[in-house]
Every structure is written in C-alpha cells, then in structure tokens.
Image (cartoon, rainbow, N blue to C red):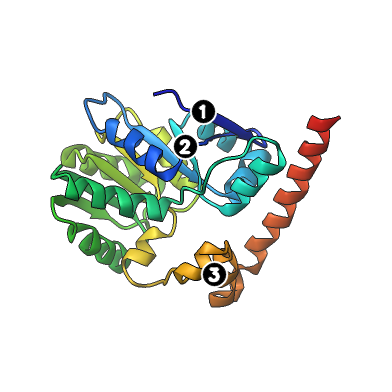
Amino acid sequence: MTIQMVDILGVPFSSMTMEETLSYITKQLHDRETVFHIVTANPEIVMCARKDPGFEKVLKQADLITPDGIGVVKASGLLGQPIKERVAGFDMMNQWLAQLSEAGKPVSVYLLGAKPHVVEGAARTIASYPGVTVAGYHHGYFKKEEEAAIVEQIQKAQPDILLVALGFPRQEEFIQAYKHELRAKVAVGVGGSFDVWAGEVKRAPKWIQSIHLEWFYRLCSNPSRWRRQLVLAEFLKEVLRERKTVKS
C-alpha cells in the first residue's frame, strides 16, 4: 500500500483515514526486522521541527506521521492538500488494541515514560484488553546514562508494540536513536496518553471533540498550558505565509 503524503511546513503527513491507518499499521506487525516508527504530530511538533533541524531530521526518518491535531487538518485544507480526518494517537491506539483483541490476535506491549504510578496505571488499563499482554514498563524519569539498561530491558521483552510517553522531541529521538536495537515491531510516541489511561487526566467530552475544541478544554482544565497554545497562532501565521507563497 502506497501512502499518500501531504507536506505541512516541511513535515510529511499521511493523509490516510483512521480506518486506513489501522489497517496499514496492523500489516507492520508481521516480520519486521526494524522498528516501524509512528509519530503522531500536532502543530507544536511541526513548529519544533521548523526551528530545530536535528528534530526535523528525526521526524523525516519516521515511517509514518499521522495528523494528531485538528490544526494540521485545517492547515492541509488551506494549503490545497486536504487531509481527510484527524488521526489522534490516543484514539488510534485504543481502537487498534480493541481491533487486535476482537480479531483474536495476541500482542505484547511495553510502556516507557511518565511517572512511576502513572505508567503502572496505564499498564493495568492496557492489560485489560483481551489478548494484550504487558511485556514490561519503565517510568520516564531516567538519565542519559541509564538508557542502555532500559534498551536492554526492552530487547529482552521483545514487545510487538512499544509505547513511548516521554513528550516530544525526546520520545521521537529515543525511538530513532535505538531503532535497530529495540526488537519491537512498532513503536509509537504517545505523549500524555499514559496520564489518560491511568485516570490522571480526563479527555474532553465527545461533543467537544466533535466541534474541534479539545485544545480549549485542555486549556480550561490546565490554564498553565496557555504558553503552549501560543504556538497555534504562530503555526497559523506560517501556514498562511506558505499558502501565499504557493499561490504566487
């Protein structure tokens, strides 16, 4: 299957729907020699890559970048390359695990990141899916010199799926740095998903998600995020500048 790509400010996004994405990544579980790296990218990640050439290189080495953020979807329309729908990392993983369970396909998962009690809680939630085994987990509070030991733990576990919740760009950089050593089949940077699975953070109600205001719900729930929200305006400014360039 050939992935149709859409360039948003230099970042190559997949334009597949959620259903198409789930079908595609399921195929990656079979006989991979190296990790299939999935990045779920929002406007913050795009802007980080725009300012950091090293991170931009890491992103472009990923095997699949999904549009996790309605801002990316809206930007694609403004640039004349509309992406069909948002493919959020948290929703993608929940639906994927559910699909694999319903299909009777046993899979093992390793979780890396977040606080100790959070990753433990997330592991319990993921283990509740029939046929899903938690091969191991480790919190995200480790130093650079401890990475080799953690990679060795993941190697021994040999999980089908590795979920890394270290926040960007650290989670993407970790996966790429050890891509040929991890012995997992699929690795996904999942940001704050462990907090949701552990019950530490609540998702916005479905109706708020449906009108694309989940970002506003998060801001109201955690006002300290306001500085992070400023990047959305910067992202829009860059998109409009790019649109003007394309049209001229």
Q: Is residue 27 visible?
A: yes
| Image coordinates for residue 137, horizontal then vertical, percent | 24, 54
Residue 4 shows which numbered tag? 1
From this view, report whether residue 131 is shown above or below residue 222: above
| Earlier-in-chain disc, 1 versus 3 | 1
State yes or no: discs 1 and 2 in contact (Cβ < 8 Å): yes
Q: Quadrant of the N terminus?
A: top left
Q: Is residue 115 visible?
A: no
- Write down the quadrant of residue 211 in the picture: bottom right
**Residue type highlighted by circle 1:** Gln
**Residue type highlighted by circle 3:** Arg
Q: Secondary structure at mark 3?
A: helix
Count of numbered circles on the image: 3
From this view, report whether residue 239 is shown above or below residue 248: below
According to the image, label 2 marks what residue?
16
Q: Nearer the viewer, residue 104 or 190?
A: 104
Q: Name the residue: 41% across, 38% down.
A: 38
Q: Quadrant of the C terminus?
A: top right
Q: Name the residue: 18% across, 58% down.
A: 127
Q: Nearer the viewer, residue 103 or 45?
A: 103
From this view, report whether residue 225 is shown above or below residue 185: below
Q: Nearer the viewer, residue 38 or 176?
A: 38
Q: Name the residue: 45% across, 41% down.
A: 17
**Residue type highlighted by circle 2:** Met
Closest to the camera, between mark 1 and mark 3, is 1
| Image coordinates for residue 161, horizontal then vertical, percent | 27, 42
Real-space Cα separation, disc 1 to disc 3, in angstroms? 31 Å
According to the image, label 3 marks what residue?
218
State yes or no: discs 2 and 3 in contact (Cβ < 8 Å): no
Real-space Cα separation, disc 2 to disc 3, in angstroms? 26 Å
Q: Is residue 1 left or right of residue 46?
A: left
